[in-house]
């Protein structure tokens, strides 16, 4: 009943109390050439209560698309229910020109959304209609009409690099996405029609009719058409107060309902069960050089992002046929069916093998609970699933009683097509709390990444604050507790440049709309009396903090001290087509990472005369079997299972390929889920001309010891003649200044030149076994390098980054065989598991 009462007083929803009101509403909407959606509900019906907030959300989204929304109380309109054959609650009926276009029986939000999307005015038509320049509007309408007619007839490619097309994109953002929805595939400087099976011709004809109506729009006020019946003439003025006004902010409000998914307690429980919290806390403590009890949320966040990116979620790039291995092609974009509906996908991409062997359906899920199972997607799925982990993350019970790691989180939507997160964290400099940018692709607290790094032309960025834990998933007030903030100014440093692009909404109207959202959200928070534990003075769920944040936007952000990278996730050509490689459309050379770690032998290793470091890429762990005296009898085999090995490595600070590396650039660990292989390679999507480099360093500080013999065993793979992989052992930490040594590993040690010596190991060559080139040295460095030959076909190979590999091995084992470094008083060794 609370839901019904709230909806019936909402600005976008009217109440029908009699058959007379019903007919007046139909007549009025017919005269206005608009749709009307009726919700026949019963107060006692739980399904009606459940879908009520969704109905209200749709009213906000579709009001500007010429759809009126009305509710019919079955207790007060029994005759009308009989007349319309209502036997199930809720029942939704869509009318136009007094005729029913479709009926949805039961609380089925997906079918309801599909029905509205088919018949409501297209969003691109709404954009055109709001344009005050008739010449610009008509030119865009003609170009769109040509594109849609092309889908019904000639079906040829359409160039997007023309002046007319560029003008349309500048004036009407989102047109390209709409054309993709209608049945085009963006191919850089042109769009290509999808197969006929992927095109809804009926829907296209409806939109073509809507475009024709644009030619009738004039600058003068539109005169109300005369009523065709005396009844309408008598009742129209009295009925005006229940008709919702056009809502130009539906695109902003559309995310509010999706945010409620994060309140699902079952999904939160699943997320916590999947998150290796203990391991992440130990890694954060080691990185911050503190005890696990003193790990701060920001330290934990860095480890959570790394784990999510490298171990949990994967990018949905190209799909390959399971039978023949051929790259599958996008054949159609269709609607979900069967079990797919549970994940609330807006669309499903269907890929087909070019030889007809297999079909792959890729639903674009919105429900994070389903994404926790699929673990694959693009930027939308990445941010959606990662936000669920942020909301769900809890400290151990012995740390602050199991409080949330992050007291408040936001889902961020950039209207130029990207999403990420913000987290309420303490600022390390000022000690005050603020909203911190976090992209699940790996960047934290870099709000200028998209403008200065990716080269995006931002215009609107909105933050959706997830309600505090006191709100339940099924609470009708939860939707009101989702605040919306315009945070565009945090993500740009040039206010003057961005203002001309903000044409979708009048600034005054937008500000008034958001103030109303703020007041509604704060009222909902206040009713629950929620305060962030231990931080009452800086509660993010308060009007004080909303105003404080708005004031912080008065001053533009400073330019970044270091150049920010272009986009790193997704195929290179896809990023280039989106213009997100960075300034000038050229992906900048990756920067060096790492803490310049220098390994030193432990007492146990010195006593055994052996420094032995091995790396297992399958488990992503290093092992130092001689690290402690009690382990010096290790024989090369391990009876421990994977979990025990990972736990032991984590405790010793040896988990993760980065953990003991001195520095690296453009490197990542790649897990092939289809081929079940694991290895280190260049970052996915990296251009062929960008090298991947990783270095390890060892120093013997004790005056009693020096390096004697050195052995190196490792698996290097080059999958093409243009892809190169190389390991190099050098006597100097500056590996660039060392001189290479020719000959095999058993050659006599040459006299060390001034710049040091350097011994290579390449694919197919014999291992370096007990070489004496470094005898008497106090330090040694190992450098792994991956690259593609210049001026070769590999330079144009989109998967060149993957074809040179280090430490390639099977991803699943029943037993582990050794791999690592060994130092005896005469010997130092590195080899792979």
Image: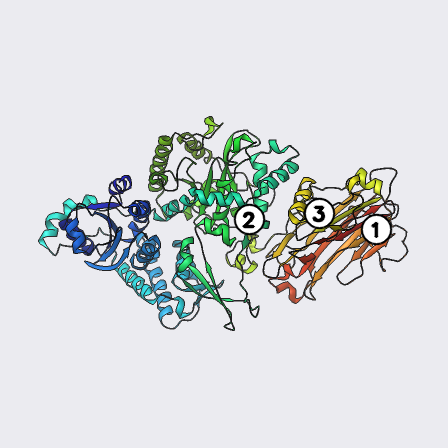
Of residues 266 and 385, the one nearer the viewer is 266
Tell which circle, 1 or 3, labels the residue nearer the N-terminal end. 3
Query: Residue most toward the front?
Result: 639
Q: In the structure shown, which secondary structural element does the residue marked by tag 2 occupy?
A: loop
The label number, if any, that marks residue 710 in the structure image:
1
Dot 3, how many residues are within 10 Å of its Cα: few (below 14), some (14-19), or many (20+)?
A: many
Q: Residue at x 14, y 51 (%)?
A: 79
Q: Label 1 vs label 2: CA separation? A: 39 Å
Q: Quadrant of the N terminus?
A: top left
Disc 1, SS: strand
Position of 316 with respect to 791 (left or right) is left
Q: Residue at x 35, y 68 (%)?
A: 149
> What residue would you read off at disc 2?
441
Mark earlier in primary sequence (2, 3): 2
Number of the label disc, if any, that sits on residue 698: none
Across and down, in percent, residue 14 comes to: 22, 45
Depth check: give the residue in front, 13 or 577. Answer: 13
Q: CA distance from mark 2 to mark 3?
A: 25 Å
User: Residue 670, located in which quarter of the rendered image?
Assistant: bottom right
Q: Decide if residue 755 is in sight here.
A: no
Which of pointers 1 and 2 lies earlier in the amino acid sequence? 2
Image quadrant where residue 162 sits? bottom left
Horizontally, is 602 left or right of 77 in the view?
right
Neighbour tally class for label 1: few under 14, some 14-19, many 20 plus, Cα within 10 Å: many
Residue pictured at 43% horizontal, 59% vertical: 166
Residue named by callout 3: 622
Q: Nearer the viewer, mark 2 or mark 3?
A: 3
Label 1 and label 3: CA atoms lie apart by 18 Å
């Amino acid at each position: 009943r609370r839901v019904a009462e709230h909806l019936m007083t909402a600005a976008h929803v009217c109440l029908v109390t009699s058959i007379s009101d019903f007919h007046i509403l139909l007549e009025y909407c017919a005269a206005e050439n608009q749709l009307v959606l009726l919700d026949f509900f019963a107060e006692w019906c739980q399904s009606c209560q459940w879908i009520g907030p969704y109905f209200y959300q749709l009213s906000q989204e579709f009001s500007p698309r010429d759809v009126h929304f009305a509710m019919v109380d079955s207790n007060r309109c029994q005759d009308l229910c009989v007349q319309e054959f209502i036997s199930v609650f809720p029942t939704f009926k869509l009318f136009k020109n007094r005729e029913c276009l479709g009926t949805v029986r039961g609380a089925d939000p997906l079918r309801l959304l599909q029905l509205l999307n088919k018949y409501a005015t297209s969003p691109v038509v709404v954009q055109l209609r709001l344009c005050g320049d008739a010449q610009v509007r008509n030119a865009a309408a003609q170009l769109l009409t040509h594109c849609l007619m092309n889908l019904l007839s000639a079906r040829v490619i359409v160039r997007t690099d023309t002046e007319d097309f560029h003008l349309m994109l500048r004036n009407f953002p989102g047109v390209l996405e709409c054309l993709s929805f209608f049945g085009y595939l963006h191919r850089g400087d042109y769009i290509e029609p999808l197969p006929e099976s992927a095109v809804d011709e009926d829907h296209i004809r409806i939109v073509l009719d809507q475009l024709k109506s644009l030619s009738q729009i004039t600058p003068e006020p539109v005169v109300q058409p005369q009523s065709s019946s005396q009844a309408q003439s008598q009742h129209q003025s009295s009925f005006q107060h229940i008709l919702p006004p056009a809502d130009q902010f539906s695109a902003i409000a559309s995310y509010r309902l999706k945010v409620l998914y994060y309140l699902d307690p079952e999904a939160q429980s699943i997320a916590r069960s999947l998150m290796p919290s203990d391991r992440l806390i130990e890694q954060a403590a080691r990185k911050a050089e503190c005890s696990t009890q003193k790990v701060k949320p920001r330290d934990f966040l860095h480890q959570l992002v790394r784990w999510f990116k490298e171990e949990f979620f994967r990018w949905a790039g190209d799909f390959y046929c399971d039978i023949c291995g051929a790259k599958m092609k996008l054949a159609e974009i269709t609607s979900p069916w069967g079990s797919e509906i549970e994940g609330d996908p807006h669309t499903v991409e269907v890929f087909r093998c070019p030889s007809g062997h297999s079909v792959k359906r890729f639903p674009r899920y919105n429900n994070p609970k389903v994404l926790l199972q699929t673990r694959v997607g693009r930027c939308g799925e990445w941010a959606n699933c990662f936000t669920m982990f942020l909301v769900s993350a809890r400290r151990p019970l012995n740390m602050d009683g199991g409080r949330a790691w992050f007291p408040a989180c936001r889902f961020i939507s950039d209207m130029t097509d990207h999403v990420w997160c913000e987290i309420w964290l303490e600022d390390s400099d000022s000690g005050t709390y603020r909203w911190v940018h976090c992209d699940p692709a790996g960047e934290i607290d870099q709000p200028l990444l998209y403008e200065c790094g990716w080269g995006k032309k931002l215009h609107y960025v909105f933050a959706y604050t997830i309600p505090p834990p006191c709100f339940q998933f099924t609470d009708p007030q939860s939707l009101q507790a989702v605040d919306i903030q315009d945070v565009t100014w945090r993500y740009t440093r040039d206010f003057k440049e961005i203002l001309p692009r903000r044409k979708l909404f009048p600034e005054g109207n937008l500000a008034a709309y958001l103030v109303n959202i703020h007041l509604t959200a704060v009222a909902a928070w206040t009713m629950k009396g929620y305060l962030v534990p231990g931080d009452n003075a800086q509660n993010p769920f308060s009007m004080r903090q909303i105003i404080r944040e708005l004031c912080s936007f008065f001053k533009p952000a400073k330019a970044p001290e270091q150049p920010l990278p272009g986009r790193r996730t997704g195929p290179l050509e896809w990023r280039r087509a989106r213009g997100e490689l960075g300034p000038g459309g050229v992906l900048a050379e990756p920067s060096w990472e790492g803490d310049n770690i220098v390994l030193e032998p432990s007492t146990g290793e010195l006593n055994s005369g052996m420094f032995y470091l091995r790396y297992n890429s399958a488990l992503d762990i290093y092992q130092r079997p001689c690290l402690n005296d009690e382990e010096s009898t290790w024989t090369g085999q391990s009876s421990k299972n994977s979990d025990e090995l990972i736990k032991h490595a984590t405790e010793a600070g040896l988990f993760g390929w980065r953990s003991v590396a001195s520095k690296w650039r453009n490197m990542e660990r790649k897990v092939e889920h289809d081929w079940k292989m694991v290895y280190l390679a260049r970052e996915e999507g990296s251009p062929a001309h960008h090298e991947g480099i990783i270095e390890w360093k060892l120093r013997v500080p004790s005056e009693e010891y020096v390096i004697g013999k050195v052995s190196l065993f490792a698996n290097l793979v080059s999958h093409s003649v243009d892809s190169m992989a190389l390991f190099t052992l050098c006597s100097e930490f500056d590996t660039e200044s060392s001189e290479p040594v020719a000959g095999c590993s058993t050659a006599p040690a040459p006299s060390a030149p001034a710049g040091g010596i350097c011994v290579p190991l390449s694919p197919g060559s014999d291992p370096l076994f007990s070489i004496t080139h470094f005898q008497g040295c106090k330090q040694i460095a190992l450098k792994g390098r991956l690259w593609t030959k210049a001026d070769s076909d590999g330079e144009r190979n989109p998967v060149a980054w993957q074809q040179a590999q280090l430490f390639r091995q099977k991803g699943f084992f029943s037993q582990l065989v050794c791999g690592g470094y060994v130092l005896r008083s005469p010997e130092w060794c590195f080899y792979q598991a």
